[in-house]
C-alpha cells in the first residue's frame, strides 16, 4: 500500500487559488496553510496604505481590497481562516493593523475600528462562498459578490462604531460609511476585474 501522504486527491473547491492546488494530500495541506498565511500578510501589507481623516476615527485603508481578494480566491473556510490569522497576528503585537498599530485593544469593544476588523472575517466568508458557487467567473457577478461582502463588513462595523464612540446609527453612518463609498466602489470594481482575469489565465472557467 502507498503511504497516506502520497494519496492523490481531487480538489473539489471551485475558488481560484484552490483550482490549482496540488493533488497530493500533504502538498495540498501545506499549500492551503501557506495560502491562508499569505492572505493574512496581503491584508497586513494593504493595511499600511492608511490615510487618517480629521473628521472620523476610521481611516481610509487598502485592507478591504485584500479582504475581498482573499475571500474570493481562497473560499469561505480558508478565507475566514486567513483573516482570523491576520487578526491573531495583529493582536499578538505584529504591526499589522492600519498605520502599523497592533494589540488586543484594537479589536476591543471600545475600538472604533474593531467592528470592521471582525467584519473582515465574515466578509471573506461570504465572498468566498459566493465565489465557490461561481460568482467570481464574470465581472458582473463578481461585482455582486464583492458588493455583498462590503455590505456584511459594514453591517458589523457601523453598529460597533456607534457603540464604541457613543453616537447614533445615523451619525455612525456619516462617520463610518459615507466617506468611504467612492473608495470602496473602486476596490469592488478592481477586485471584480481581477478574479475573472485570473480564471482566464488558469484556463479553468
Image (cartoon, helix red, strand yellow):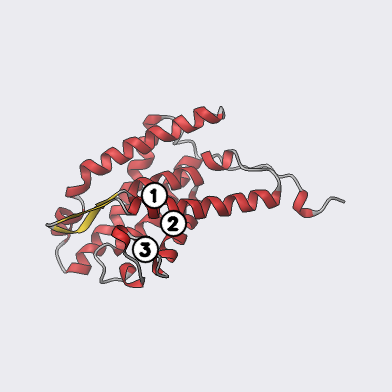
Q: Residues within 10 Å of mark 3 (few under 14, many from 20)?
A: some
Kindly identify which residue carries mark 3: 95
| Image vertical order of residue 54 relative to residue 28, above or below | below
User: Residues at badges 2 and 1 in contact (C-beta under 8 Å)?
Assistant: yes
Q: Earlier in the sequence, mark 2 or mark 3?
A: 2
SS of the residue under disc 2 = helix
Where is residue 134 shown, x and y percent of the image?
48, 36
- Disc on res. 67: 1
Where is residue 40 shown, x and y percent of the image?
45, 55
Q: Earlier in the sequence, mark 2 or mark 1?
A: 1
Q: Residue furthest right?
A: 1
Q: Is residue 106 left or right of residue 69?
A: left
Residue found 35% across the figure and 57% down from its top: 119
Residue 77 visible? The answer is no
Residue found 50% across the figure and 46% down from its top: 74
User: Residues at badges 3 and 1 in contact (C-beta under 8 Å)?
Assistant: no
Q: Quadrant of residue 14?
A: top right
Q: Earlier in the sequence, mark 3 or mark 1?
A: 1
Q: Quadrant of residue 159?
A: bottom left
Front disc: 3 or 1: 3
Mark 2 and mark 3: Cα distance apart in space: 15 Å
Residue 103 visible? The answer is yes
Residue found 81% across the figure and 53% down from its top: 3
Q: Residues within 10 Å of mark 1 (few under 14, many from 20)?
A: many
User: Residues at badges 2 and 3 in contact (C-beta under 8 Å)?
Assistant: no
Kindly identify which residue carries mark 2: 83
Where is residue 142 shown, x and y percent of the image?
39, 35
Mark 2 and mark 1: Cα distance apart in space: 7 Å
| Image vertical order of residue 90 relative to residue 181, above or below | below
Amino acid at each position: 500500500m502507498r503511504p497516506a501522504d502520497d494519496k492523490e486527491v481531487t480538489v473539489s473547491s471551485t475558488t481560484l487559488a484552490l483550482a490549482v492546488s496540488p493533488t497530493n494530500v500533504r502538498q495540498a495541506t501545506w499549500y492551503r496553510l501557506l495560502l491562508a498565511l499569505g492572505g493574512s500578510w496581503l491584508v497586513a501589507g494593504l493595511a499600511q496604505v492608511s490615510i487618517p481623516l480629521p473628521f472620523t476615527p476610521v481611516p481610509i485603508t487598502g485592507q478591504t481590497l485584500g479582504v475581498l481578494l482573499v475571500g474570493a480566491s481562497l473560499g469561505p473556510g480558508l478565507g475566514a481562516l486567513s483573516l482570523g490569522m491576520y487578526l491573531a497576528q495583529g493582536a499578538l503585537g505584529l504591526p499589522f493593523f492600519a498605520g502599523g498599530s497592533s494589540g488586543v485593544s484594537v479589536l476591543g469593544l471600545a475600538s472604533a475600528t474593531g467592528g470592521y476588523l471582525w467584519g473582515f472575517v465574515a466578509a471573506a466568508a461570504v465572498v468566498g462562498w459566493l465565489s465557490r458557487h461561481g460568482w467570481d467567473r464574470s465581472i458582473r457577478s463578481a461585482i455582486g459578490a464583492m458588493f455583498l461582502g462590503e455590505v456584511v463588513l459594514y453591517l458589523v462595523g457601523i453598529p460597533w462604531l456607534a457603540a464604541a464612540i457613543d453616537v447614533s446609527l445615523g451619525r455612525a453612518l456619516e462617520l463610518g460609511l459615507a466617506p468611504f463609498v467612492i473608495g470602496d466602489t473602486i476596490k469592488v470594481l478592481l477586485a471584480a476585474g481581477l478574479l475573472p482575469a485570473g480564471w482566464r489565465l488558469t484556463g479553468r472557467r
